Image (tube, helix red, strand yellow):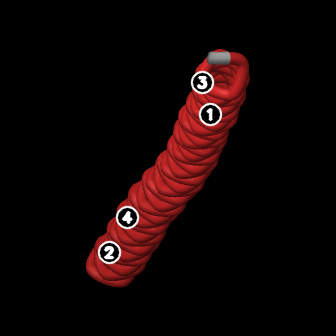
Amino acid sequence: ELKEAQRKEDERRREEERQEEERKEAERKEEARKEEQRREEERQEEERREAELKEAQRKEDERRREEERQEDERKEAARKEEARKEEQRREEERQEEERREAELKEAQRKEDERRREEERQE
């Protein structure tokens, strides 16, 4: 009877120990699962931050290119305006030169006419 009671007690203790080991193993597995989930969430968060950073960089590059394009357009417009003014200045000089030449010819013609008139009168 004593041996049987001892055997049953040993069996009960072994069963308790086995269940305790199973419980500890289940706890360990759950902790490992949680840790793996935490790492995965961190990895995804890092990917999200990198994607946001890339997008911000892309937008900044695009903004800078647009600014440069507008600056180039502004410079080109200023260059064209300068060329137009220079062309206008040259045209005005040419017309002024033509006017002076015409005045000179007219003065010369009058002078010649006056001289011929003088010669005729003599």
Q: CA distance from mark 2 to mark 3?
A: 155 Å
Q: CA distance from mark 2 to mark 1?
A: 135 Å
Element class at badge 2: helix
Q: Earlier in the sequence, mark 2 or mark 1?
A: 2
Q: Which residue is mark 4?
A: 32
- Give the left or right position of residue 73, taking residue 16 as reference: right
Q: Look at discs 2 and 4 and give the one toward the viewer.
A: 4
Type of amino acid under label 2? Arg
- Circle 1 packing at 10 Å, graded few (<14), some (14-19), many (20+), is few
Q: CA distance from mark 3 to mark 1?
A: 21 Å
Q: Residue furthest front?
A: 122
The answer to whether residue 97 shows anywhere in this view is yes
Q: Earlier in the sequence, mark 2 or mark 4?
A: 2
User: Where does the image place residue 113, in percent across and percent down from the top left?
Assistant: 70, 28
Type of amino acid under label 4? Ala
- Circle 2 packing at 10 Å, graded few (<14), some (14-19), many (20+), is few
Q: Is residue 107 above or below residue 88?
A: above
Residue name at image x 55 percent, y 36 percent: 90
Q: Look at discs 2 and 3 and give the one toward the viewer.
A: 3
Q: Is residue 19 above or below residue 63?
A: below
Element class at badge 3: helix
Q: Look at discs 1 and 4 and give the one toward the viewer.
A: 1
Type of amino acid under label 1? Lys
- Give the left or right position of residue 14, taking residue 61 as reference: left
Q: Which residue is mark 3?
A: 119
